[in-house]
Image (cartoon, rainbow, N blue to C red):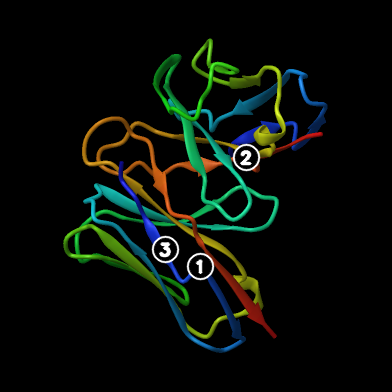
Amino acid sequence: TQLLEQSPQFLSIQEGENLTVYCNSSSVFSSLQWYRQEPGEGPVLLVTVVTGGEVKKLKRLTFQFGDARKDSSLHITAAQPGDTGLYLCAGGPISGYSTLTFGKGTMLLVSP
Amino acid sequence: DTGVSQDPRHKITKRGQNVTFRCDPISEHNRLYWYRQTLGQGPEFLTYFQNEAQLEKSRLLSDRFSAERPKGSFSTLEIQRTEQGDSAMYLCASSSQGARNTEAFFGQGTRLTVV
């Protein structure tokens, strides 16, 4: 079973601060997705990373896939209250069927 | 197409009753997934369809749970003889048959409360 560990579990910061959240596994993934989920809603896909070492930027969000495709990080610059939510990483398997394995998520609270 | 649609958004039922949820995926997507999410947890995989074929089921999917996708389009998830432990958010997602990545697009979920 592929297991994704996310850290920290909870993060509370002030508007304008920078932060990084992590997603780690002992397994190799074919791809890794980051989602953001608001209370009572389904997860919304932010980005997919596929190649080891890949870096993708989405406005103030920077996503990195580890060289060995076992870990990933999400860095947010100058956080805003609108960034508040549960950030989930999900990995796709190397072989087998196409199901995604999710971490437990990092709950981010950005206060004005 | 406006994305993955789930119905109902909320369901409250008495213990022992049966419930059925519906998911309409993005129209060109041939893969459909059901996940369950409880408070403080990430989504847990339940089952996966490619077209009308159910290709994988989690051990979480007890014999009280059944899912169908009869025409390879919409899907239903039925829970028989509901228990309080079934209370959760049930999420449906869909994806297209791609190469390496398995990115999935989620619906808004059905929140089930068993009382």
Determine contact: label 1, label 3, CB under 8 Å: yes
Can you tell which quarter of the image residue B58 is in? top left
Q: Residue at x 24, y 58 (%)?
A: A70
If the image is split into quadrants, where does the C terminus of chain A sit? bottom right
Determine contact: label 1, label 2, CB under 8 Å: no
Q: Is residue B103 above or below residue B30?
A: below
Q: Which residue is mark 2?
A: B2
Residue B61 position, x and y percent, is: 51, 25
Can you tell which quarter of the image residue B84 is in? top right
Give the chain of mark 3: A
Of marks 1 and 2, the one in the foreground = 1
In this picture, residue A26 sits left or right of residue B68? left
Q: Which residue is mark 1?
A: A9
Q: Is residue B19 above or below residue B70?
A: below
Q: CA distance from mark 2 to mark 3?
A: 31 Å
In this picture, residue B36 sits left or right of residue B10? left
Give the chain of mark 2: B
Foreground pick, A43 / B51: A43
Dot 2: what SS? loop
Can you tell which quarter of the image residue A83 is in? bottom right
